[in-house]
Amino acid sequence: ETGVTQSPTHLIKTRGQQVTLRCSSQSGHNTVSWYQQALGQGPQFIFQYYREEENGRGNFPPRFSGLQFPNYSSELNVNALELDDSALYLCASSLFAASYNEQFFGPGTRLTVL
Amino acid sequence: GQQLNQSPQSMFIQEGEDVSMNCTSSSIFNTWLWYKQDPGEGPVLLIALYKAGELTSNGRLTAQFGITRKDSFLNISASIPSDVGIYFCAGYSGGSNYKLTFGKGTLLTVNP
């Protein structure tokens, strides 16, 4: 049984560019949540996908968008990158939407915006 | 964005000492969670709490769901060097948004 994996590990972009981050959920999990973790802060909920539909969203602008695929892997897309988007982006998978006791996090993608 | 009030921000203790940290919120939560995050990794769930007043242990870790549903506590007994890391509390208020709200974390350093 594989765990949650994310790619790439690190990424450097410039302001105004677009970025796509990827997440493969743990085997059997159909729910993926994305979080943004700025340096020295706790993770902030971006959104959650359940069976390919957005299932909940935090206080992030529309330039943060996502997709979930039939195999339950997921993408996070960020358009018009800003300097404040520099952060660790975490995805977490779970069997159900609110089964947080069975939610597992990936190692994250470190995004730097210059 | 909203974050829970977690304290202390950091702790530096000697191996063998007990540790206490807490988390408070202005809102009520139905679920409280405690995580540990090591450098370069995602958070790992330590304890999940589902009921006001609930006291749950996981080895040397004990956590409590406050009676007001607005706070939670985590205690670590007889600390060891591998307890070093950042500890986060998180709360879920229920409803259909499925938003998990995290605290800012407590950085724990254990001196051997």
Image: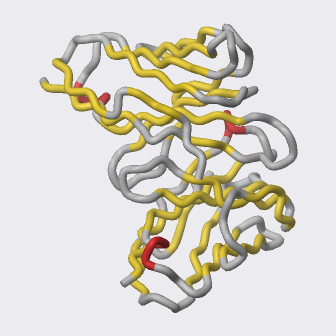
Where is residue A55? Give x, y as percent: 83, 57
Please say which color scheme the image uses.
Answer: secondary structure
Q: Residue at x 65, y 54 (%)?
A: A26
Compare residues A89 and A74 and report the one nearer the observer. Answer: A89
Q: Is residue B7 above or below residue A44?
A: above
Quadrant location, the C terminus of chain B: top left
Q: Is residue B49 above or below residue A51?
A: above
Q: Residue at x 79, y 73 (%)?
A: A69
Q: Is residue A76 above or below residue B51?
A: below
A100 with respect to B13 (left or right): right
In the current view of this chain or complex, which residue is farthest to the left?
B112
Q: Residue at x 47, y 76 (%)?
A: A8
Q: State how many labels appear.
A: 0
Residue A49 is drawn in which quadrant? bottom right
Q: Is residue A76 above or below residue A42?
A: below
Residue B53 is drawn in which quadrant? top right
B50 with respect to A81 (left or right): right
In the current view of this chain or complex, which residue is farthest to the front?
B26
Q: Residue at x 32, y 37 (%)?
A: B85
Where is residue B73? Give x, y as percent: 51, 17
Where is residue B59? Give x, y as percent: 46, 15
Where is residue B94? Give x, y as percent: 81, 36
